[in-house]
Image (cartoon, rainbow, N blue to C red):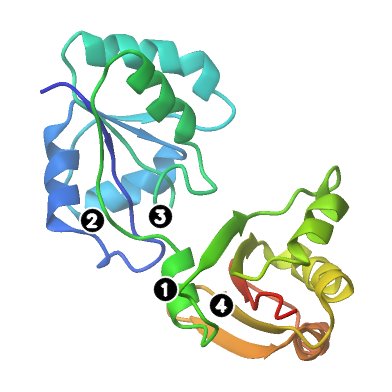
């Protein structure tokens, strides 16, 4: 049946891929991906010969009409991201919404995403949590942090290495320097690491040790 498949890919370790995901990528007519060079490595590893097509935040609005037409004509298409589940801080929402608006079936497979292992491994309560992804760089950042200062649920953020210290300092100013955090980097990869400190301690650490890799920050909720 023609449909759009949302297929999570490994966030680092290539062994974190399901048999079902591999079979679907072999069976579909086309795979949409962010970076064809990066995705090609995954396909070669699993002997997947399905054609790739670039589909990312800079061309998704232009391309989505063509994708819908292909599925309506009977093709099965899969959408993957460079790492993790499409739509989670990656392109994917527009494709899902547009397909549903055109009565196209969408099927999302379970699979890798960085936020869940970082959360479970944090030692911070995870019975209730809110995923914030990347904070706004400028416009709306201060307002968002002010609102989150009263958030009682555990909060999850993504951050790049060159913005990590700024974000931790912003957290300290908004949440208090004694707020507990768990900071994970390079999840599933050879240099995977998680540190569990206060915001004050983590700022001191990364001032002395320049951050490397991609980060997931778990922040304790407000207790007041």
Element under disc 3: loop
Can see residue 212?
Answer: yes
Work out whether mark 3 precedes mark 1 in sequence or the reverse, and give the earlier one. 3
Residue at which label 2 appears = 45
User: Which numbered mark, 3 or 1, is in the foreground of this view?
Assistant: 1
Instruction: Report x, y in % for residue 29.
Output: 18, 25
Quote the CA–CA distance across marks 3 and 2: 17 Å
Residue at which label 3 appears = 84
Q: Is there a contact, CB below 8 Å, between mark 4 and mark 1?
A: yes
Quote the CA–CA distance across marks 1 and 2: 24 Å
User: Which numbered mark, 1 or 2, is in the foreground of this view?
Assistant: 1
Say which of 198 and 183 sits in front: 198
Q: In which quadrant of the rendered image does the C terminus lie?
A: bottom right
Instruction: Report x, y in % for residue 143.
Output: 85, 51
Quadrant for residue 55, please give it. Answer: top left
In the rendered view, would you say 98 is above or below 178?
Answer: above
Instruction: Report x, y in % for residue 53.
Output: 37, 28
Work out whether mark 1 precedes mark 2 in sequence or the reverse, and give the earlier one. 2
Q: Residue at x 40, y 74 (%)?
A: 188
Residue at which label 4 appears = 184
Quote the CA–CA distance across marks 3 and 1: 12 Å
Q: Is there a contact, CB below 8 Å, between mark 3 and mark 1?
A: no
Residue at which label 1 appears = 117
Element under disc 1: helix
Query: Around disc 1, counting alpha carbons within 10 Å, would you say few (fewer than 14), some (14 to 19), or many (20 or more)?
Result: some
Q: Is there a contact, CB below 8 Å, between mark 3 and mark 2?
A: no
């Amino acid at each position: 049946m023609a449909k759009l498949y949302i297929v999570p890919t490994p966030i680092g370790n290539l062994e974190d891929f399901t048999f079902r995901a591999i079979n679907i990528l072999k069976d579909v007519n086309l795979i949409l991906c962010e970076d064809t060079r990066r995705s090609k490595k995954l396909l070669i590893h699993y002997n997947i010969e399905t054609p790739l097509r670039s589909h990312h935040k800079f061309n998704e609005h232009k391309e989505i009409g063509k994708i819908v037409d292909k599925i309506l004509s009977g093709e099965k298409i899969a959408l993957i991201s460079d790492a993790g589940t499409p739509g989670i801080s990656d392109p994917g929402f527009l494709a899902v919404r547009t397909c549903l608006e055109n009565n196209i079936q969408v099927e999302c497979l379970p699979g890798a995403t960085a936020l869940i292992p970082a959360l479970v491994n944090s030692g911070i309560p995870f019975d209730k949590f809110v995923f914030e992804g990347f904070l706004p760089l400028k416009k709306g950042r201060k307002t968002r942090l002010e609102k989150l200062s009263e958030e009682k649920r555990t909060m999850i953020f993504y951050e790049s290495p060159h913005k990590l210290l700024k974000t931790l300092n912003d957290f300290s100013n908004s949440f208090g320097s004694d707020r507990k955090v768990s900071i994970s980097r390079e999840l599933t990869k050879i240099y995977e690491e998680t540190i569990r400190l206060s915001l004050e301690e983590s700022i001191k650490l990364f001032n002395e040790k320049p951050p490397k890799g991609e980060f997931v920050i778990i922040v304790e909720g407000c207790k007041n």
